[in-house]
């Protein structure tokens, strides 16, 4: 009996534990063996996992596609930068900031939490309106929100620097600092999806009418997920701005949105494992394509390179190719399976979700 | 005279220009099994949707234990003890059978009782225990209907409304569904309101029958007065005169 309890506990924590452990092994390997380029490539993957997890918490559980989440990353990224940057720079360049922000010099890791809070508040305000809309209207409204945020951040010179990038943003620390926040994002997403809120939201994804007939307030559940996903996006945006060290609003715009959504869809939008698989797979393909655009030097001195812009085009084709073969993404909505030795006998089927026709 | 548990008074519902319900009145007393019979497009599903808060009435009212619920939200009405099993066995297909049942239990707010009920229901529907960890979408049609009913019971309702429980099921399975409903009623004393297209089976289980056609109640009587089926047939098909 004791053994059974232990096994069912293992079953519930296996997915986040397995994913985090696997990523930790790779991170350690990269840290010990990798060159600087490889290390920053892997750090960016870790940060993208945070961002795609943000998308996933809302999209994966509610089934409603939201295109505007990069806006929350933008909000978070700027808050983190404002709080942690050198006071002198802010007093000269960002005269529109309130005095206490200008003089603030918060530790980067602490400002990540402030970024999460700010993004959560933004998500609450926006979500309270948007989440009421029906599926496709909600998707378009989130997209419109992204445009609005981008326009504001690109033009409000005295607060965001406008078109001139913010520079001298401090660093968060090495690869492991990003790793810690990534692990936190995965744990948050997992706790939410295991909670009764997550279960109720996934029920509404399957059937909205039946969910309401079961007493579920679909609006409230969607709003909870929206705010939580906004907070995680804020975290990702903050960590990303520390990673880049330089920030413009266009960092968090169309091309990032496109990339993150491709990752989510390719990995499988209905499982957390899909998030990790999608980010790693698409990042690797996209890196190969980027190297292709850079080109290789031929012995006779000529450069052989893909035309610029091919990265996006081929990435789109890659997504279509994956979706033709696996409409639900690589993972098809299932989570990391527990190794056979640990499974309880009757739960062998639990890894087979979504295979119904 | 007991007060009716559910009362619908002079209900008008239209979708744009098309009137789906044109002045429907109906009541269900505590402990009764009431069946609404009528052809396709008679307004049966609209009636249930209007009661459960899924469709808005232009006129008339819906009263649950004397209280007006016509402007309530579906989830709030469900919390008041009125559970709808929507047409077409709408189960949560990517969630497991156990998760489907658990969701119904959330509304009770009493986790211990919910667990006990889930166990009890699994005794009643052994197939649900066997398939507890299966995704619900992989159950057969009859099993899904059982699950939808079981999930409704998990909300611990006083009134269960079932929209066409026999839709798309083999006759043998339909018999099973009705036997289970009769058993649940005997055990838990719930009140039932059931929509059906055909009257044959309904006569055996119902206390009272309403015939709905063209958005209006054509006939309302106790089942034992309708056993020969002639009156139902006339109301159902709209033959006003003999021999037409």
Image (spheres, rainbow, N blue to C red):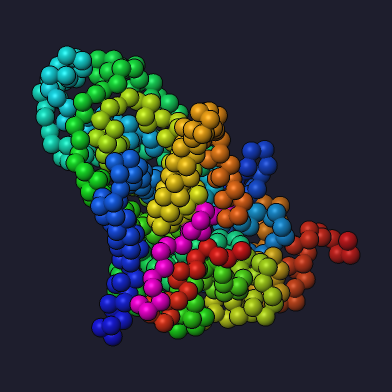
Q: Magenta span covers which residues?
A: A327-342
Residue at point 29% right, 21% down?
A: A165
Q: Residue furthest bottom?
A: A1
Residue at point 66% right, 67% down?
A: B167
Residue A210 on image: x %, y %: 50, 58
Query: Looking at the rendering, which quadrant does residue A215 occupy?
Result: bottom left
Q: Nearer the viewer, residue A143 or B154?
A: A143
Quadrant of the frame with the C terminus of chain B: bottom right
Number of numbered discs: 0
Identify whether A245 is placed above or below A56: above
Judged left or right of residue A348, residue A242 is: left
Judged left or right of residue A44, residue B52 is: right
**Does the magenta stretch mainly form a helix, a strand or a loop?**
loop
- Tell me if residue A44 can be seen: no
Q: Is residue A343 magenta?
A: no
Judged left or right of residue A255, residue A35 is: left
Q: Nearer the viewer, residue A215 or B81?
A: A215
Identify whether A268 is placed above or below A338: above
Q: Nearer the viewer, residue B220 or A238?
A: A238
- Tell me if residue A22 can be seen: yes
Residue A82 on image: x %, y %: 20, 27
Residue at point 59% right, 77% down?
A: B178
Residue B32 on image: x %, y %: 52, 72
Residue A47 on image: x %, y %: 32, 43
Q: Nearer the viewer, residue A195 or A40?
A: A40
Q: Residue furthest front?
A: A300
Q: Is residue A335 magenta?
A: yes
Residue at point 39% right, 45% down?
A: A52
């Amino acid at each position: 009996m004791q053994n059974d309890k232990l096994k069912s506990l293992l079953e519930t924590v296996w997915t986040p534990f397995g994913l985090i452990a696997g990523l930790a092994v790779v991170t350690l390997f990269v840290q010990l063996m990798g060159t600087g380029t490889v290390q920053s490539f892997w750090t960016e993957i870790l940060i993208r996992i945070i961002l795609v997890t943000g998308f996933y918490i809302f999209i994966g559980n509610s089934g409603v596609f939201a295109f505007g989440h990069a806006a929350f990353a933008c909000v978070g990224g700027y808050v983190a930068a404002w709080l942690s940057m050198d006071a002198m720079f802010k007093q000269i360049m960002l005269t529109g900031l309130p005095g206490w922000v200008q003089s603030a010099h918060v530790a980067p890791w602490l400002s990540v939490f402030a970024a999460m809070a700010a993004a959560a508040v933004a998500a609450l305000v926006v979500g309270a309106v948007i989440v009421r809309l029906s599926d496709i209207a909600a998707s378009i409204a989130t997209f419109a929100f992204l445009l609005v945020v981008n326009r504001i951040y690109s033009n409000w010179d005295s607060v965001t620097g406008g078109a001139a990038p913010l520079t001298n943003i401090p660093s968060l620390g090495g690869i492991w600092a990003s790793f810690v926040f990534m692990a936190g994002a995965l744990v948050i997403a997992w706790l939410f999806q295991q909670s009764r809120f997550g279960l109720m939201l996934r029920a509404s994804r399957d059937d909205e009418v039946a969910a309401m007939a079961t007493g579920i307030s679909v609006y409230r559940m969607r709003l909870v997920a929206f705010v939580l996903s906004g907070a995680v996006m804020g975290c990702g945006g903050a960590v990303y701005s520390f990673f880049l060290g330089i920030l413009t609003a266009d960092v968090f715009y169309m091309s990032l949105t496109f990339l993150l959504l491709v990752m989510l869809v390719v990995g499988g939008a209905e499982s957390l494992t899909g998030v990790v698989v999608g980010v790693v797979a698409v990042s690797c393909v996209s890196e190969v394509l980027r190297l292709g655009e850079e080109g290789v030097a031929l012995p006779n001195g000529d450069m052989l390179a893909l035309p610029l812009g091919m990265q996006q085009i081929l990435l789109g084709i890659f997504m279509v190719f994956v979706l033709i073969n696996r409409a639900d993404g690589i993972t098809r909505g299932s989570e990391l399976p527990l190794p056979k030795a640990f499974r309880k006998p009757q739960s062998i089927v639990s890894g087979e979700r979504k295979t119904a026709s | 005279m007991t007060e009716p548990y559910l009362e619908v008074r002079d209900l008008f519902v239209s979708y744009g220009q098309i009137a789906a319900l044109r002045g429907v009145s109906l009541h269900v007393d505590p402990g009764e099994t009431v069946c609404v019979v009528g052809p396709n497009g008679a307004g049966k599903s609209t009636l249930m949707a209007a009661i459960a808060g899924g469709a808005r009435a232009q006129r008339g009212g819906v009263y649950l234990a004397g209280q007006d619920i016509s402007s309530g939200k579906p989830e709030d009405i469900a919390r008041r003890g009125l559970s709808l099993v929507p047409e077409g066995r709408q189960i949560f297909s990517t969630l497991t059978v156990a998760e489907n049942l658990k969701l119904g239990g959330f509304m009770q707010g009493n986790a211990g009782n919910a667990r006990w009920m889930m166990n009890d229901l699994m005794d009643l529907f052994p197939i649900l225990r066997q398939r507890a960890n299966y995704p619900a979408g992989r159950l057969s049609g009859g099993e899904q209907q059982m699950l939808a009913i079981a999930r409704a019971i998990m909300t611990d309702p006083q009134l269960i409304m079932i929209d066409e429980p026999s839709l798309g099921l083999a006759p043998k399975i339909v018999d099973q569904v009705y036997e289970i409903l009769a058993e649940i009623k005997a055990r838990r004393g719930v009140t039932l309101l059931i929509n059906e297209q055909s009257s044959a089976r309904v006569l055996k289980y119902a206390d009272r029958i309403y015939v709905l056609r063209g958005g209006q109640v054509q006939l309302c009587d106790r089942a034992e007065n309708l056993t020969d089926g002639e009156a139902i047939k006339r109301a159902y098909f709209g033959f006003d005169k003999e021999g037409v």
